[in-house]
Image (cartoon, rainbow, N blue to C red):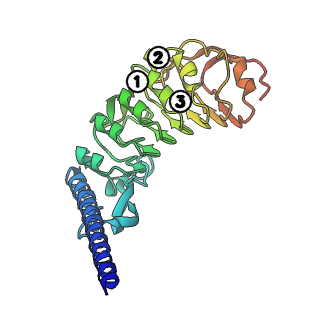
Amino acid sequence: MERISILGFIVAILYFITMELACNGYTHMSNNIQSEQEALIDFKSGLKDPNNRLSSWKGSNYCYWQGITCEKHGIVISIDLHNPYPRENVYENWSSMNLSGEIRPSMTKLKSLKYLDLSFNSFKGMPIPQFFESLKNLLYLNLSGAEFSGTIPSNFGNLSNLQYLDLSSEDLSYDDFEYFNDLSIGNIEWMASLVSLKYLGMDYVNLSSVGSEWVEVLNKLPILTELHLDGCSLSGSIPSPSFVNFTSLRVISINSNQFISIYNQLHGRIPLGLGELPNLQHLDLFDNYLKAVSLNC
């Protein structure tokens, strides 16, 4: 009998410990869900949505809101609110899906966010938020054509997990828009920290202050496969790096870098180092002052 009593006592203790752990786990999960939902609601409240595109953003089941994807336990991993209609095609369609306003810091509460796409909306000249660097788990970030302006934050170098980054601006030849992207980079060194990057899009971002340094910096990205730097005010020659590291490159587009009309200037010889890229499939050097040499690509 005494053994049975001791065994029953042990079972009771184990039961209470299990229940306590379960309750604590449930409380933690509930707190996470509440935090994620509050962050999304505050994010929405900062946006201007004149055509009620985010009408589904109500109720408690936020994982079914338009543009939101969750993993288990209601953890938000993706926000995809890109505008599917390019402005230069049908303006009425673009404006019907356009979001503007401000991006609030509450987004940083979404600690597991991996995918963020706000491209082709209209943030009307506001700077890219500095607090994006807190989204350490981001794999995909697309802010292209969203009418941001100013200097791209150098703390983006902290986003070392990024695999896809597109900050491309509008071609300034589309002068019928009220706003256009006017982004620039002062110091390009921070890009060397984006060691997971596979795609980099920075078309029409002003890189005039970086000189030829962009080659050496981007050469430090070993798995970069696509590089888009059209119309970036690049100038001087294209230096051949002492050691070619970005051998994964399949696409290089650096066209329209001349000081002609709205364009810029990129002159000199095509670097022989490009011939050492075994996976290169597409090379666009259109509208540049380049001396022709043969390439063994």
Q: Nearer the viewer, residue 127 or 195?
A: 195
Disc 1 and disc 2 in contact, CB within 8 angstroms: yes
Q: Position of residue 43 (x, y in %)?
A: 24, 52
Q: Nearer the viewer, residue 137 or 91?
A: 137
Give the residue at mark 2. Answer: 210
Amino acid type, residue under disc 3 in the picture: Leu
Mark 3 vs mark 2, CA separation in Å:
13 Å
Q: Neighbour class for label 1 at 10 Å: few (<14), some, many (≥20)? A: some
Which badge, 3 or 2, is on the more N-terminal residue?
A: 2
Q: Secondary structure at mark 2?
A: helix
Q: Is residue 48 left or right of residue 140?
A: left
Between the C-alphas of marks 3 and 1, the distance is 12 Å
Residue sitting at x 39%, y 42%: 136
Q: For mark 2, does the 10 Å Cα neighbourhood hold few (<14), some (14 to 19), or many (20 or more) residues?
A: some
Instruction: Specify the label residue 229 is tagged with.
Output: 3
User: Closest to the observer: 192 or 90?
Assistant: 192
Instruction: Using the numbered discs, state the Cα–Cα distance from disc 1 to disc 2 in whole angstroms.
Output: 8 Å
Of the residues under marks 1 and 2, which one precedes in the sequence? 1
- At label 1, the amino acid type is Ile
Query: Which residue is located at x 80 percent, y 26 percent?
Result: 296
Is 30 placed above or below 222 here?
A: below
Determine whether label 3 and label 1 are within 8 Å by CB: no
Residue type pointed to by label 2? Val
Q: Secondary structure at mark 3?
A: loop
Label 3 crowd bin: few (<14), some (14–19), many (20+), radius 10 Å: many
- In the rendered image, which quarter is residue 258 located in? top right
Residue on which disc 1 sits = 185
